[in-house]
Amino acid sequence: MTKRLNLSVQYACNKDDLPLRPQIRSWVRAALDVDGVRGGQITVRLVDAEEGQELNRDYRGKDYATNVLSFPYDVEPVVCGDLVLCAPVVAREAGEQGKTLEAHYAHLIVHGLLHLQGYDHEAGEAQARQMEDHERTILAALGFTDPYLDEK
């Protein structure tokens, strides 16, 4: 299996505080390697509220902008998929949760990458716990605190 990561980062909104491509690459790589080093063909798109709402409505039937949408295409031989992050929602949530914007972006990209690999927190308590445990481990290795610390 190839370990190569082909990453496309698309900045589809005008915000000054978006994560830089090298940051995104490190977060994507860390999440891809959760079950062993693997390759990926990943697109990360940062969008405004209008595009975020449109995509959430069209693909999930929910007429509001959400923080991250995952579009998985394949997991073998490499992980293929798209992540869409809605910058205004991510910024608002970071403020509400008292987190740095960088930490919240890192968490949501790791979370989305786990979805691209087949993890699903909505598939029951055991899967939710497994996914959260992976997120904690990956984020700790990247130097971030537990994103679920305040929920306990």
Image (spheres, helix red, strand yellow):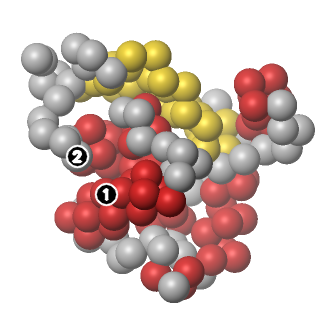
Crowd rating for badge 1 (residues with CA inside 10 Å; few <14, some 14–19, many 20+): some
Which amino acid does the dot numbered 1 rest on? His
In front of the other: 83 or 95:
83
Q: Position of residue 102 (x, y in %)?
A: 46, 63
Measured as percent of width and height from the top left, residue 108 is found at: 50, 52
The reply to whether residue 9 is in sight is no
At a point 13% along the width and 25% down the height, the residue shown is 3
Left or right, 90 with respect to 88, comes to left
Q: Is residue 139 left or right of residue 88?
A: left
Answer with mark 2 or mark 1, whichever residue precedes in sequence.
Answer: 2
Q: Residue at x 39, y 25 (%)?
A: 42
Is residue 75 or residue 22 the one in the foreground? 75
Q: Residue at x 69, y 76 (%)?
A: 96
The quadrant of the image that shows the N terminus is top left
Q: Quadrant of residue 54?
A: top right
Q: Position of residue 6 (x, y in %)?
A: 28, 21
Image-based side of 129 in relation to 68, left or right: left
Q: Secondary structure at mark 2?
A: loop
Nearest the viewer among 17 and 124 is 124
Is 146 rendered above or below residue 29?
A: below
| Label pair 2/1, CB-CB below 8 angstroms | yes
Which residue is the site of mark 2?
34
Residue placed most toward the observer, 20 or 26: 26
Q: Type of residue at label 2? A: Val
| Vertical arrangement, residue 121 with respect to residue 5, above or below | below
Residue at 67% across, 37% down = 47
The tag on residue 102 is none
Is 6 above or below relative to 85?
A: above
Residue placed under numbered mark 1 in the picture: 134
Q: Is residue 126 above or below residue 148?
A: above
